[in-house]
Image (tube, rainbow, N blue to C red):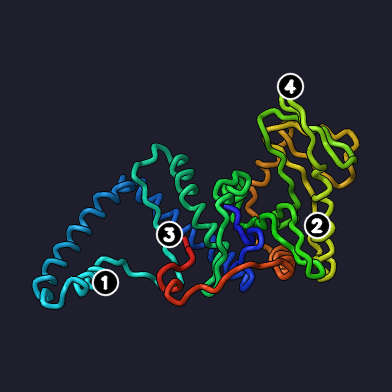
Amino acid sequence: MAQLIKLGDYVSRYENNMLHYSSQFSQLKKQQWTSIKEQWERGTLGLYKEDTAINEEASNGLLKRFKKNWDKLGDSSIDSIKEVVVKPAMNHGVFDFQPVFYYRPHTLEDLKHAYMDKLFPFQLKWASQTLIEKSYIDSKYRREEPLRYFLHQFPDTYLLMYKPVILLKNAPVELDILLITPLHAWCIHVLEEADRTVYIGSTQRFWTVKTGSHEKRIVNPSLSLDRTESIIKGLLKREAIDLPVKKMLLSRNGYIDYPDLPFGLSLLDKKNYESWFNHQQSSNLPLKHIQLKAARTIMAHTQTTSVQRLEREGDEEQPPAF
């Protein structure tokens, strides 16, 4: 599962310590997955309803004993006791990710998919909150399938900046997707509509998109890719970071027809996508110093829109640690 280090212009804990949080992410996710897998193998996964009922019954019994001694104090005092007894202990600084399964996945592969689906909203929180700041997540990101795809399908050592906003001379510029791997910094523009859609490319300002008998025009996507590549190359060159920057047009379910393909632009569509994807997914390269340095450099030039977390909120709703 790739690491979401920057989402739009939201605050990111990776801004403070790229190495620490990138290492912590992998460690905590692995620990949580091992625990869930062991429960699944023992056949105890999905029994939380019964456990919850037992705990609630025990809590109610305890409350009855308290009530006998505190009747004279009034209902408001009883409510405050209930809050103390029932409220689970919170590990300050860490929001424990404890997914609830109300069914037992039939296969290990089903379990993996269920686990990642439950992890996804927590990863959005992880990428948009710190101990003292938070950003309000637009609900569109929870439904944005390309974002889920990049996070679910690539290794932990791949760092994702999803359409980050860069400040250039105090002017915000939204970039394409950045996938920073141990070997490259990929600038990616995703083209996805209906299955078997054909994108007819050219060097002109507009492209033609054909889906069955329907036809429309879109702005040439390579224009934004060129801008993204130019900005990222400039930032890395300024810090003498020698990490190759590549750009790609990606369509997993369609075809890209671009006869006059410019030099340095990669096209991935239904014809050749699988071989590239399998190669990336099987990567076992560790995080590299130059990769982290590149990510820190880019992050230092991003825009952040956030608010201060309230002191009480900081105690009761900590960012997720999986």
Above or below, 15 relative to 212 = below
Disc 3 from disc 1: Cα separation: 21 Å
- Camera-side residue: 51 or 124? 124
| Residue type highlighted by circle 1 | Val
Q: Residues within 10 Å of mark 1 (few under 14, many from 20)?
A: few
Name which of mark 4 and mark 2 comes first in the sequence.
4
Q: Secondary structure at mark 1?
A: helix
Answer whether labels 1 and 2 touch (C-beta < 8 Å): no
Residue 54 picture quarter: bottom left
| Front: mark 1 or 4 | 4
Q: Which residue is mark 4?
A: 213
Q: Which residue is mark 3?
A: 97
Q: Secondary structure at mark 4?
A: loop
Q: Is residue 320 left or right of residue 4?
A: left
| Residue type highlighted by circle 2 | Pro
| Front: mark 3 or 2 | 3
Q: Which residue is mark 1?
A: 84
Q: Secondary structure at mark 2?
A: loop
Disc 1 from disc 4: Cα separation: 64 Å
Name which of mark 4 and mark 3 comes first in the sequence.
3
Name which of mark 3 and mark 2 comes first in the sequence.
3
Residue at 48 percent of width and 62 percent of height: 28
Disc 3 from disc 2: Cα separation: 36 Å
Residue at 35 percent of width and 41 percent of height: 104
Q: Is residue 80 left or right of residue 303?
A: left
Disc 4 from disc 2: Cα separation: 40 Å
| Residue type highlighted by circle 4 | Ser
